[in-house]
Image (cartoon, grey):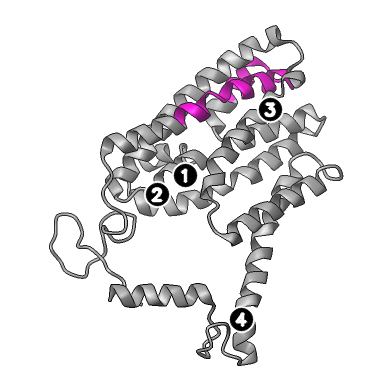
Amino acid sequence: MAEQTAPPEGTGAPGAPPAGPGPAVEDRPDKPDAAVVRDALGVGVAVGLSGFAFGVTSAGSGLSLLQTCVLSLLVFTGASQFALVGALAAGSNPYTAAAGAFFLGVRNAFYGLRLSQLLALPRAVRPFAAHWVIDETTAVTLPQPTRRAARIGFTVTGLTLYVLWNLTTLVGALGAEALGDTDAWGLDAASPAVFLALLAPMLRSTVERVTAALAVLLALTLLPVLPAGVPVLLSALAAPAVLFLTGRRKRGPADRGDGGPDGDGDGGNDEDVAERQKGERRT
């Protein structure tokens, strides 16, 4: 399938890949800086305020004010922080709780592999930027059409979220005593709810929705029988399971030699045909 590309910024070399992280310019037009900043601030403020819930939950689980604030300053990955204090509140061994939080935070390393290519930051800045590689900065950065927009989105989201998350963590930890029984307020559900609100619009295809539904089912099924934090880790098995079943379904017609649904003998499906037709129109 022919693919249209645009010359990189500042050069007129025909056929060269675009300078930005996204596909062809006509498919993803330039986005004004003000629009990128607006979107980044929206995510940063919305999620940053949920640091209050973490402060309250952490203090309610027995961590001191200093321990709570240091967690937000140095760990700075909400899901892992909630997993740690949740496991401690449930009576788990501190080392087991820390291990579960660590493995949950490993996902950020995979985000970093992709973001490092998109942002292409100077070496001196990378160690500091790595601290801001989290779910929200990744969600804002990846859709940007150019490298400039990606850098703006990453920086504004990371800075806003880091400052607000730590400030609201401090306020939440200080106010935990005034709130009384923190479990009665259900504030530990605030961060997961915000993350789901960010994730839901990204589930566009049937495969993505099925994967998410299976992951939720696995987590809920394993929750009563496994230690805190473990069901969330095991729910990640939904992704390879769905990919395996999808691959077998697509390979089935080709293996039988019946030509598949499109009848052209290549085992393709309706989506493959539509994609090829789209490419032919572009050519």
User: Residue type at mark 2?
Assistant: Pro
Badge nearest the viewer, 4 or 3: 4
Picture mark count:
4
Q: Quadrant of residue 193?
A: top right
- Of the 4 image quadrants, the one containing the N terminus is bottom left
Q: Which residue is mark 3?
A: 188
Task: Using the image, tell me which numbered label, if any, was put on residue 162.
Answer: none
Q: Which residues are magenta?
A: 44-70
Look at the image and say whether residue 213 sits in the magenta stretch: no
Q: Which residue is mark 1?
A: 139
Mark 4: few/some/many CA within 10 Å (<14, 14-19, 20+): some
* x 61%, y 55%: residue: 209
Q: Residues within 10 Å of mark 1 (few under 14, many from 20)?
A: some
- Mark 1 lies on a secondary structure that is helix
Where residue 39 sits, quadrant-wise, is top left
Residue that mark 4 sits on:
251
What label sits on residue 143 in the rendered view? Answer: 2
C-alpha separation, residue under disc 2 versus residue under disc 1: 7 Å
Disc 4 element: helix
